[in-house]
């Protein structure tokens, strides 16, 4: 699933006339870069959620014949559902027995997804309970040691135990090893029943923090991860250089 419904307020004035997903980097829209990365390693079904200038994304995909993939639209034009609500609404579009890779549209990285979900699978196998090979309800969050304002907190087994805002000092759950979230994670649909009592709109991280005491929500610290959040105008130039050195999906 590609999160592409956001308003892109930090990319104004570009997003006054287009969705963030269609802002161009290296000659192609951000959405193109994520789709090509997924396609290159064998993904065949992708769900894209839309809200801001939704019709532009729909038209772009149609004009490109969905890049030869089974691309489905999760329509949030009636109201943004945030990350958790977005997943909840989109669940009927997925195979209920298969894990879902979720990727923010404005994230560029060198994360190796060759072989599908193998990096995350290896993270699970290291602890003897791979969420992608078994039906155990679980999520895996790709994280790294990176400077940010908000850190996820993990215990010695890389299980999620909390969250902390280092500017305000606010803590949810417990403190542990602080790592930065990448905007890339795995959600297993067997967690879906736990969402039934949640509202239509909520952040996925609030959900993970709520359920992590009773369900294994694990972090995967990707080795040598290089990541760029293309969320602000001043990162667009950085993104060009980033693609030159870290992406195999150059247009």
Image: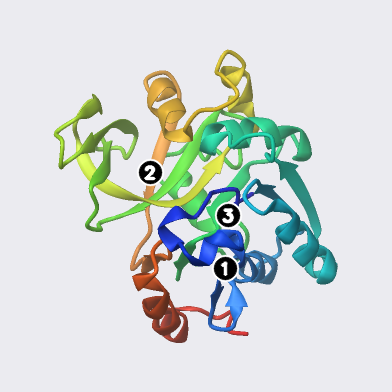
Tell me: residue 119, above or below residue 68: above
| Between 182 and 27, the one nearer to me in the picture | 27
Does dot 1 land on a helix, a strand or a loop? Answer: helix
Distance from the alpha carbon under mark 2 to that under mark 3: 14 Å
Q: Are marks 2 and 1 in contact (CB under 8 Å)?
A: no
Residue at position x 66%, y 54% from top?
53
Residue at position x 24%, y 37% from top?
156
Q: Which mark is residue 117?
A: 3
Does dot 2 land on a helix, a strand or a loop? Answer: strand
Q: Quadrant of residue 209?
A: top left
Tell me: residue 232, above or below residue 218: below
Q: Is residue 46 visible?
A: no
Q: Is residue 106 visible?
A: yes
Q: How many marks?
A: 3
Tell me if mark 2 has few (under 14), some (14-19) or many (20+) residues whose alpha carbon lies within 10 angstroms of its own: many
Distance from the alpha carbon under mark 2 to that under mark 1: 25 Å
Q: Position of residue 202 (x, y in %)?
A: 50, 28
Q: Are marks 1 and 3 in contact (CB under 8 Å)?
A: no
What residue is disc 1 on?
A: 30
Distance from the alpha carbon under mark 1 to that under mark 3: 21 Å
Q: Position of residue 161 (x, y in %)?
A: 30, 29
Among the two numbered marks 2 and 3 on one chain, the one whose residue lies closer to the N terminus: 3
Does dot 3 land on a helix, a strand or a loop? Answer: loop
Among the two numbered marks 2 and 1 on one chain, the one whose residue lies closer to the N terminus: 1
Tell me: residue 181, above or below residue 10: above
Q: From the image, which quarter does the C terminus lie in? A: bottom right
What residue is disc 2 on?
A: 219
């Amino acid at each position: 699933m590609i999160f592409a419904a956001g308003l892109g307020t930090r990319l104004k004035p570009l997003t006054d006339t287009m969705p963030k997903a269609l802002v161009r980097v290296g000659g192609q829209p951000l959405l193109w870069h994520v789709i090509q990365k997924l396609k290159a390693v064998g993904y065949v079904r992708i769900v894209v959620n839309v809200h801001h200038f939704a019709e532009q994304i729909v038209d772009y995909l149609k004009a490109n014949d969905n890049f030869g993939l089974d691309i489905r639209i999760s329509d949030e034009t009636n109201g943004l559902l945030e990350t958790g609500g977005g997943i909840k609404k989109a669940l009927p579009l997925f195979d209920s027995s298969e894990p879902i890779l979720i990727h923010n549209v404005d994230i560029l990285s060198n994360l190796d997804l060759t072989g599908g979900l193998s990096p995350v699978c290896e993270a699970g196998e290291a602890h003897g309970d791979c969420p992608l090979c078994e039906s155990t309800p679980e999520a895996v969050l790709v994280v790294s040691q990176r400077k940010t304002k908000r850190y996820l907190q993990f215990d010695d087994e890389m299980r999620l135990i909390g969250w902390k805002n280092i500017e305000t000092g606010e803590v949810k759950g417990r403190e542990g090893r602080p790592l930065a979230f990448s905007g890339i994670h795995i959600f297993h649909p067997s967690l879906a029943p736990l969402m039934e009592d949640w509202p239509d709109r909520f952040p996925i991280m609030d959900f993970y923090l709520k359920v992590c005491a009773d369900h294994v929500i694990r972090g995967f610290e990707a080795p040598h991860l290089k990541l760029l959040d293309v969320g602000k105008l001043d990162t667009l130039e950085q993104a060009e250089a980033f693609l030159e050195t870290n992406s195999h999906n150059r247009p």
